[in-house]
Amino acid sequence: MAGTRITATVDDAQARAMLARLGEPGTADLMPRLGEYLQRSTQERFRAQTAPDGTPWAPLQPRYARRKKYHQDKVLTLRGYLRGGIHYQVTGPHTVDVGSSTKYAAIHQLGGTIGHNAQSRRVRFRSVAGRVLFAGAKHKRAVTERWVTRGAYQVDIPARPFLGISAADDAEIREIILDWVVGRGK
């Protein structure tokens, strides 16, 4: 799975000892259970707006919050693509990966700085009911046009971790494994 991910490896000595007593059955049906749980838990963090350790995500910058069209009160949610892009993949007999393949998942998980180069381009304007609006390149009623230059700038994005295993996740993973082992022993 490309992009940002977290790997959960099941390596519990007690579970292995019990598996050895049960004739070492495979974990083919356990890993998808764990993956589904971790995927659901990660997606729930978008509703709670918190990191796996329970700390709230950094709030939106006021300037961005004012111009944001959808979900103005939600961090990391404009149209839900990041949350919807979280999937799991069983990558081995004892390993399941949970993550997102979206291009921007890593910058939101880890934080960082995005640099924008200087830019110069022609901008066209039109007038509608006394208001000046942007006009597209092919708009026929453009009143004025001018060259606009914007200098280079940087955008600092704080880390807002959404991937990880919380204490509640750890307890639930142990319960899932225990239920699976007990179910195998019957």
Image (cartoon, grey):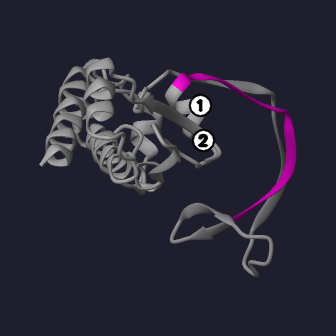
Residue 59 is a magenta residue:
no
Query: 79 or 53, which lies in front?
Result: 53
Question: Is residue 119 highlighted in magenta?
Answer: yes
Q: Which residue is mark 1?
A: 107
Q: Is residue 107 left or right of residue 67?
A: right
Residue at 42% x, 40% y is 76
Q: Quick check: 137 above or below 85?
A: below
Q: Which residue type carries mark 1?
A: Ile
Residue 170: image x %, image y %?
A: 25, 25
Nearer to me, 113 or 66? 113
Residue range of the region highlighted in magenta in the rendering: 110-125
Q: Are marks 1 and 2 in contact (CB under 8 Å)?
A: yes
112 horizontally vs 142: left or right? left
Amino acid at circle 2? Tyr
Quick check: 159 left or right of 47? right
Label at residue 143: none
Residue topped by disc 2: 104
- Residue drawn at x 61%, y 47% is 1
Q: Is residue 97 visible?
A: no
In which quarter of the view is residue 11 placed?
Answer: top left
Residue 157 image position (x, y, % from top left): 55, 25
Which of 44/63 is in front? 44
Find the distance from the CA under tag 1 to the CA under tag 2: 6 Å
Depicted 98 relative to depicted 59: above or below? below
